[in-house]
Amino acid sequence: VSIFAFVAATPAVLVAIVGWLTLERGIDVSFSGQIKELLQTSVGVARAYQEFQCRAIGREVRLMASDIGRARSVLDENRDVFREYMRSRSYFLGFYVAVLMRQDTSIVERIDNVEVPNLLLPKEEEFRAADDAGDGICLLQENSNIFRALVKVPGFDAHYLLVARAIDPKALQFPQQA
């Protein structure tokens, strides 16, 4: 009886092995190119999203810096009114944090609309890059979904505006994982 069972099972096992090999070697090869192309396209889309977010935050930080530059006299005359103006501008532009600071990283005014733990202040080379770029720079904070932007504020002597907002963490992680 056991010999009969062995003889009856042998063709089924052979068909399963041949079927598995056919799928593994034949179909997998034809799909692997398409899967690789799909993955590369997805990485490209994620990078494009990051670049779009960077351009958007750059445009909005320049707008806010220009507004703050025009409000310099308010800062000199009434700091509370200036602080409220800065708070409303940062809130309506969607910034979690807005910091008016000097190049030595001393803070003139800081607005926290949403708490951002461990927000990094710019390094000396980032201030130089913001000066060289003219329009400011976009900064990614490592191991975080926080986008930051830094721009020199017109109408001030060596004052900069640093802003921060969160973006979807999947958009930052996907290109690195792929």
Image (cartoon, helix red, strand yellow):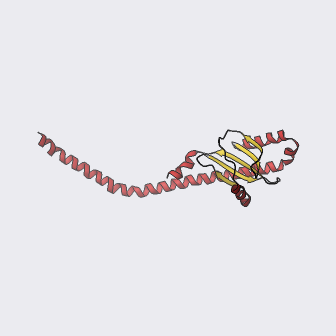
Quadrant where the N terminus lies? Answer: top left
Decide which of 103, 100 is in the foreground and name it: 103
Residue sitting nearer the eye, 106 or 14: 106
Tell me the residue at 67%/51% (across/down): 56
Q: Residue at x 72, y 61 (%)?
A: 132
Residue 135 drawn above or below residue 120: below
Q: How many marks?
A: 0
Decide if residue 61 is on the left or right side of residue 177: right
Q: Is residue 133 left or right of residue 34?
A: right
28 vs 167, nearest the viewer: 167
Q: Is residue 95 left or right of residue 40?
A: right
Which percent across, then down, holds residue 100? 76, 47
Question: Which residue is at 72% across, 55% downward?
Answer: 127
Q: Residue 38: x, y in percent?
A: 47, 54
Image coordinates for residue 22, horizontal then vertical, percent: 29, 54
Lateral position of residue 165 relative to residue 70, left or right: left
Residue drawn 57% across and 49% down?
172
How far across and how far down the image is residue 137, in percent? 69, 55
Quick one: which residue is furthest to the right in this view?
Answer: 77
| Residue at far bottom of view | 132
Q: Nearer the viewer, residue 144 or 135?
A: 144
